[in-house]
Amino acid sequence: MLRFGSTSSGPLGDPRSAERWLLTLPVNDPLVAERSIVNELRALAERTARRGPSALEGVFSVDAYASGLARTLTAQYVQHVDRSAKIGDQLWQALFELTQGFQTCYAAFARDAGDQSPSGKWRALLPGLVGRQIAYLRQDAKLRLYRWERWDAAKWSALFGTFMRACGHRFERAPLRLDPMGGPTTIEREFLMTLLLHLANPGNLTPKEVEWIAAQLDAWCQPLRLTVTPPSSTTFYVDLTGSGGLRRRSLAPLEGRVLFVDLRPLHALLVQNRTVLEQAVKSEPRSENVGQYRAQFELYNKLASRIDPEYRPLARRGDRKIASGPVDAIVGFPSICSYLRRDDAAAIGPAGAGHSFGSTMELAVFGRTREPGAQLRSGGGRLPAVTAPGVTWEMKDVSTSGFRLNAPMGAVAELTLNTLVAIRRRDQEAWVLGIIRRMRRLSAREAEIGLQLIANALAGADLCEQRKVREADYSVNGEIPTVTGREFQGLFLSYSRREGEPPVQSLIVPAVEYHSSRHYTLRTLGSQRTMRYGHVLERHADWVWTVVDPAAPATAAAGSGPAA
């Protein structure tokens, strides 16, 4: 039986046809354009499709258009991933499908070019084909890092096989232009950029930080070269027959197809930038940009530690102890506030003038209040409604600074770095509060979570803004009267690093309710005090962690704004 292939390559049959087809794509709807491109790439990758040099040139034209499309989708993803998990997932899926579409299509062309002796036109297009294959493998790695996934052995094999093909044809250092918006590059540099992206990942980068690192890779890798002999005793190497990226050289002999790269110049650059940021933080401690400087310093510190040829791990804040057992977990600031809210609102009403934070101190010392029916021991029926979805979380180890837990992928898919999580071990009554600092996918069903402990005990808090009466013509004991303003919920935290130490108290409030110049009435566990926000410890899109700064009544009245 005779079998006939397709008589044409569709709209991607040649560069001119591809350019005409691109003009029909919607300019203001990148998701529709992405789906149209992916469909054509999949059709061209079919076994029966006709693929020749002209069709490959057509795909190159679509690739140039898609690079701008990918930049738009990436910017939207980084902007929305912390605001809406649903929108973020939709954008990530579109980027992933676009990347997979080009990888599959280029792999089909690479097989066709390898099955026959390359003609002159195939030979001219082969460097661009191999370079784009490596570039899209790096894009695949970047997208997976957004979700804290790592490559398996098959991906490393694909990267090494593609690079060795370029080395076999001896065009790995030939200049070529892959991105019309970028400068000339080489296949060796694209390969090094992919290796460095993996090496720079400590496992706790946000999508914004991953994107920033990816934007720096080209400049960082320009002076780097791969060599067959080690340039020094302290260097990195990659085994082209292995299943991993760059590794520090050890004293043991190396086997296989090994290439070396000297990262000392890059490490020196990172250390220099880290020092500049450290000086900026010290010289301007009260600057509005000090938070940004401190975040950049922490990032450079992580990168310098990862790229240092001499292994100097960051010091741990405490020794880890093996732990096990299931834990309950409440994810997100709103869910935690909802659970900790007292059933009886009257119990959090204004306290008398002689009252203090006795209940709060009991919470800090004992991990719970001694009052009958206290909120941390009640509300069991409300727990399933606010706990994290999926199977029970499992404790793996514990230290003075936090926890390592394993969580089901059903729960991890909705999590991001810097998410608040309240956990309680099944054999304990008290809840503790932490912030997700690290995530790593272990398998298709399970992921590892690193949780920084910020509170040994927590309680729900009600805050009420104080406002001065406009044009008041009287005073009480010399104090201008105030009226209550808007009310909102927060979290009152107590943290002791060691047993017996006095607790440090702080507050987490919604980001939209943080106003440093205003005064508030803080009510928690039957106690009441006048306060204002102090030093900001951490700020994110939906919550702010701040120190509690007590305010005298006279000061509060003088500093409050007029009532509307």
Image: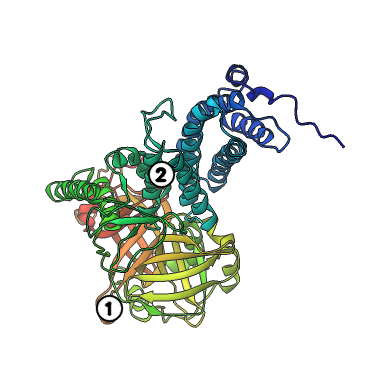
Q: Could you say which quadrant of the image residue 239 lies in?
A: bottom left
| Quadrant containing the N terminus in the rendered view | top right
Give the camera-side residue of 526 and 77. Answer: 77
Distance (Cα) linking label 2 and label 1: 48 Å
The colour scheme applied to this rendered structure is rainbow
Give the camera-side residue of 495 and 65. Answer: 65
Q: Report the residue at 44% width, 29% height from top.
A: 179
Can you see residue 39? yes
Give the camera-side residue of 56 and 344. Answer: 56
Can you see residue 72? no
Q: Report the residue at 30% width, 66% height from top.
A: 250
Q: Amino acid at mark 1?
A: Arg
Extreme right residue here? Answer: 1
Q: Residues within 10 Å of mark 2 (few under 14, many from 20)?
A: many
* Circles 2, 1 touching at the beta carbon (< 8 Å): no
Q: Position of residue 466 (x, y in %)?
A: 32, 51
Residue that badge 2 annotates: 191
Q: Secondary structure at mark 1?
A: loop
Nearer the observer, disc 2 or disc 1?
2
Q: Report the residue at 41% width, 26% height from top.
A: 181
Q: Amino acid at mark 2?
A: Phe
Q: Which mark is residue 498?
A: 1
Q: Secondary structure at mark 2?
A: helix
Relative to 494, residue 513 above or below: above
Q: Residues within 10 Å of mark 1 (few under 14, many from 20)?
A: few
Q: Is residue 218 left or right of residue 304?
A: right
Q: Position of residue 447 (x, y in %)?
A: 51, 64
| Quadrant containing the C terminus in the rendered view | top left
Extreme left residue here? Answer: 283
Q: Which mark is residue 399?
A: none
Q: Is residue 300 left or right of residue 336?
A: left
Give the camera-side residue of 382 and 418. Answer: 418
